[in-house]
Amino acid sequence: MTDPSAIPSQTPPAAPAAFTGASIDRLRKLRCRPERNLTITATVDQYRREASKSRRGMGNFVDAWEAVVPAEIAATSRVRGVRGGIARIGVVDSATSYEIDQQLRGGMLAELRLAFGGTLRRVKLEIDGSLSR
């Protein structure tokens, strides 16, 4: 027979801590999902900022293009866009494209860079059939 005092004493399990109102509220916040913002205000504002930035850069380049390029060439071309330092110019035909390309290589690109003031790495010429109409 074993002596009951020889058995190691086991302590009764600790009683669960009583939850307070604050801890229950904290748990509820963690369990419940926050309500979604269904308004499109942030998206509209982002598009507005991007469009304004794009318009500013494009407008400055159009002014520089009209100031630097001779009038007869400017009449047969149009600025299609400026993005990432690359200006896209639409021209009527390949002859006009060749003439503008030769002038760009002859120093007009440097003049455009000075007049534009922004980043201008190169000018990409594209044949645009809608200009011949």
Image: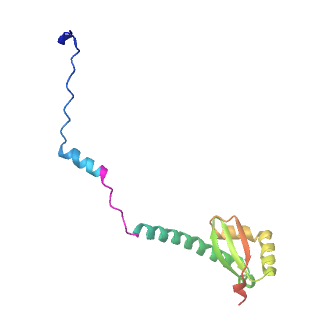
Whole-percent x, y for residue 125 in the image: 74, 74
User: Which stretch is magenta?
Assistant: 30-40
Q: Is residue 3 left or right of residue 82?
A: left
Quarter of the figure with residue 78: bottom right
Rendered position, 130 above or below 124 = below
Most common secondary structure along the magenta stretch: loop
Where's the N terminus, which quadrant?
top left
Closer-to-camera residue (20/63):
20
Closer-to-camera residue (27/78):
27
Whole-percent x, y for residue 25 in the image: 23, 49
Residue at 74% x, 82% y is: 73
Q: Is residue 123 left or right of residue 3?
A: right
Residue at 77% x, 76% y is: 100
- 13 inside magenta stretch: no
- 31 inside magenta stretch: yes
Rendered position, 2 above or below 44 = above
Where's the C terminus, which quadrant?
bottom right
Rendered position, 74 above or below 15 = below
Closer-to-camera residue (23/86):
23
